[in-house]
Image: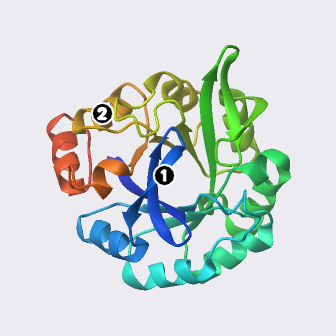
Amino acid sequence: MLTTRLIPCLDIKNGRVVKGTNFVGLKDSGDPLELAGKYYRENADELVFLDITATNDKRKTVMELASRLAKVIFIPFTVGGGISSCEDAISIVYSGADKISINTAAVKRPELISECAVRLGSQCVTVAIDAKRTPSGYKVFTNAGKNETDLEVVGWAKRCEELGAGEIMLTVMDADGTRNGFDNVITSEVSKAVGIPVIASGGAGKPEHFVDAVKIGRADAVLAAGIFHEGLYTLNDVKKHMRNNGVPVRL
């Protein structure tokens, strides 16, 4: 039986881990290497490392940090932020990352997904979708949630799969940082529409939310940040609750 992955996310700005609400109001949450080591010891299944200002600041993802991460954790980790070419992606994987995450660049040039999948394998390519509810439905946003596009979330997720993406990381901006629970409506719609794994992101506040993301949202993996950074719960606290409620996890 496949287990559900529990994934802490480290959003990086200027070399530090930060966390906000609805993609704004960022506050310092610590050193990325220290937190990565902590989560590794706490039984994280994977880690996601996102340089959240790389795209807007026109910077490349910090390769050195990816390389240093690879020396302190021995679980898969994903790196995203500022990846605009297949060469960028290859460099990140060569630096030690197991997967790359692309968002804005994929929207601007969808063939980037296929190029990365051919060179690295689909299993290495995660497409991050920042979604927000609008009067005309859930739309895709780019540039760290600043720019609304005309892309409808479910349709874009399906297109990403067709182009070779290995998984979708779906972050719902309205829920992000609120700790009121994941948006299981759109998560479920995306999960039913694609045949690749979907990571639910945005809104985790208590262990029950992770169970709901899997049972209602049909997520294959669940990602969270703030509640772990602040020590409200440990990963093992959440995993035990998930297992006790019928969700298979690795303990």
Give the side of residue 199 with respect to residue 146, left or right.
left
For the point 62% across and 76% down, the residue is 62
Is the Cβ of the residue at disc 2 closer than 8 Å to that at disc 1? no
Where residue 173 appears, as percent x and y from the top left, is 54, 35
Residue 93 seen in the current view = yes
> How would you rate the neighbour count of disc 2 (Cα within 10 Å): few for under 14, some for 14-19, many for 20 or more?
many
What residue is disc 2 on? 209
Q: Amino acid at mark 2?
A: His
Q: Is residue 36 above or below residue 175?
A: below
Q: Which mark is residue 26?
A: 1
Which quarter of the figure has residue 229? bottom left
Where residue 112 appears, as percent x and y from the top left, is 81, 56
> How would you rate the neighbour count of disc 1 (Cα within 10 Å): few for under 14, some for 14-19, many for 20 or more?
some
Which quarter of the figure has residue 102? bottom right
Where residue 21 appears, as percent x and y from the top left, is 46, 40
Q: Which comes before the other along the chain, label 2 or label 1?
A: 1
Secondary structure of the residue carrying numbered label 1: strand
For the point 71% across and 69% down, the residue is 89
